[in-house]
Image (spheres, rainbow, N blue to C red):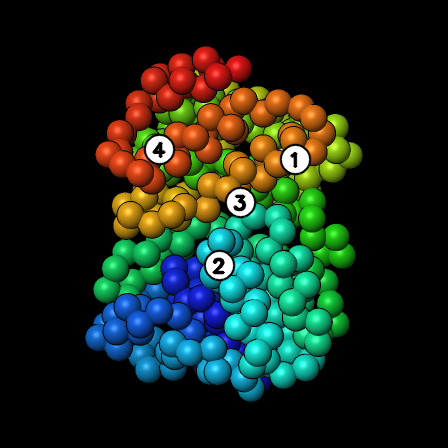
Amino acid sequence: MSIAVYGAGGIGCYLGGRLAATGTPVTLVGRQRMADELAEHGLHLTDYLGADLRVQDVPFETEPTAVADAELVLVTVKSAATATAADELAAVLKPGAIVVSFQNGIRNGDVLRERLREQVVLSGMVPFNVLNRGGGAFHQGTSGGLDVQAHPALTPYAEAFATAGLPLTQHVDILPVQWAKLLLNLNNPINALADVPLKEELSQRSFRRCLAAAQAETLGLLDAAGIKPAQLMAIPPHRFPALLRLPDFIYKRLASKTLAIDPLARTSMWEDLQAGRRTEIDYINGEVVRLAESLARPAPINTRLVGLIRAAEQGPRKAWTGPDLLAELTSAR
């Protein structure tokens, strides 16, 4: 069993590290900066349930040729780099290799599939949050396993993922699952703009009302497009906005039954802004804007969130309060 992780950043190092910790051979492929970090510190993986794993000597390479013999490749590059990654993989992968996109957004699997005609390309989704704490430490801060497009070729790998604490849930139709995850990811720009941990942000009703507005707008567009997002948690997606708008004490009681979040959790978009990197806003709220354009309908809330994040990418940054951000989004309607 030969598994490679292509684009080993936060998500990639965590997935690859969990597999390696239980004896599955894994090769990580990523930037020299991460290679140097892991060479010095090794991998330290923790999660909200108390897992505390240290993994040494996981092979880390920086060239695409490292995946030439891989039978399964997990693609975890940022969405904007998908086309480049696909071209790099096409030049080295053997025919019949399995490629799984574990990336944010809706269309990455399609981009890979267009370029990797001789491989089995599947769309997947990582529903949980991973925080890069630096020094080779990665923390899973929210609950969830892995979701992936169903295919018989995955059968030989199911046990390895389950043993690693990353059970694969296979779906015949992955698109509703991707949209369900994107509904949750609409909080990424809100968390990044708030500049506080997820749990602290979601404990404030004003921030939750911002997310409720973005989700309600998206759900209306999905209805118009005939897309029904999958139910991934205890409540159906169309009830998310109502839950988020509840008073704090009621929300806290109900939310604890739907999604586990520990105090360390933050979003990858917050990490990107902290590091001065371009975010994935075009592949999260930007997907909603594109859907609205295809339907000739407006999406003012998500459009404004895209604009605020693009401004934050340019700097200087502002830490928004919940009431100020809610007023900003409300004025965009």
**Number of other residues with Cα within 10 Å of mark 3, as a class: few under 14, some 14 to 19, many 20 or more:** many
Above or below for 103 versus 309: below
Check residue 159 in the rendering and tell me which mark sits there, or answer none: none
**Direction from residue 164 to residue 120 in the image, left or right:** right
Q: Residue at x 62, y 63 (%)?
A: 112
Q: Is residue 62 above or below residue 295?
A: below
Q: Earlier in the sequence, mark 4 or mark 1?
A: 1
Q: Amino acid at mark 2?
A: Ala
**CA gap, disc 3 to disc 2?**
11 Å
Please give the name of the residue rendered at 26% of the width and 73% of the height, measured from the top-left corner: 36
Q: Callout 3, which amino acid?
A: Tyr
Q: Nearer the viewer, mark 3 or mark 4?
A: 4
Q: Where does the image place residue 203, in percent across and percent down from the top left?
A: 38, 28
Residue marked by disc 2: 81
Front in this rendered view, residue 120 or 211:
120
Q: Which comes before the other along the chain, label 3 or label 4?
A: 3
Type of amino acid under label 1: Leu
Q: CA distance from mark 3 to mark 4?
A: 16 Å
Which dot marks residue 291? Answer: 1
Mark-to-mark CA distance, 2 and 4: 21 Å
Side (left or right) of 165 relative to 196: right
Q: Provide the secondary structure element on which disc 4 rests.
A: helix
Badge 2 marks a residue whose secondary structure is helix
CA gap, disc 3 and disc 1? 11 Å
The secondary structure type at the circle numbered 1 is helix
Residue 220 in the image: above or below residue 153: above
Circle 1 Cα neighbour tier, 10 Å, few/some/many (<14 / 14–19 / ≥20):
some
How many angstroms separate mark 4 from mark 1 (CA)?
Answer: 22 Å
Asked where in the image residue 55 lies, by quadrant, the reply is bottom left
Residue identified by numbered label 4: 311
